[in-house]
Image: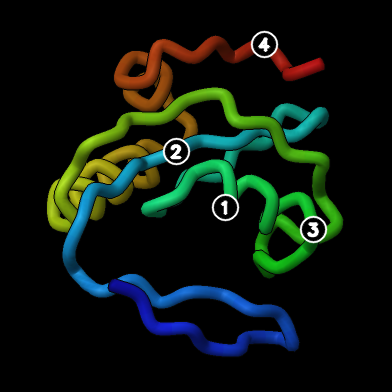
Amino acid sequence: MRLAKERNGAQTSTVLRTGEYSVYIVQNSAGRFYTGITDNVERRVEQHNSGVSNWTRNKGPWKLVWQKKGLSLSEARKLELELKGQKGGDGFFRKTGLSRVTAQ
């Protein structure tokens, strides 16, 4: 079940606390990472690339490089905060298996 709402002139969705969530990481060609939570990774990556997301706007294109599926909202939030808390340090790369090499 979802509720729709408008944000910055673009249709976004507000998801109620049911269903499965994913934590995902996208990377741009400069090697910057963005970590987020969603119930639909494909849609969310599209939003990052179309400028709907404020932080990633004008910094793309963004490519999905990692995701963990099948989490409850609580589990997803905990993992997202854990990854963001690493601030791109060794723990971030250890937990995700990603490389420090810049995306191409």
Q: How far is mark 2 from mark 1, CA to CA?
A: 9 Å
Neighbours of disc 3 within 10 Å: few (<14), some (14-19), many (20+): some
Horizontal arrangement in the rendering, residue 16 relative to residue 63 (left or right): left
Amino acid beneath label 2: Tyr
Q: Which residue is mark 2?
A: 24
* Coordinates of residue 14 in the picture (x, y in percent): 40, 77
Which residue is painted at 45% across and 49% down in the image? 40
Q: Is disc 2 in contact with disc 1, using a CB cutoff of under 8 Å? A: yes
Q: Earlier in the sequence, mark 2 or mark 1?
A: 2
Q: Which residue is mark 4?
A: 101
Q: Which residue is mark 3?
A: 50
Q: How far is mark 2 from mark 4, CA to CA?
A: 18 Å
Q: Earlier in the sequence, mark 3 or mark 4?
A: 3
* Coordinates of residue 23 in the picture (x, y in percent): 36, 41
> In terms of secondary structure, where does tag 4 sit?
loop
> In terms of secondary structure, where does tag 2 sit?
strand
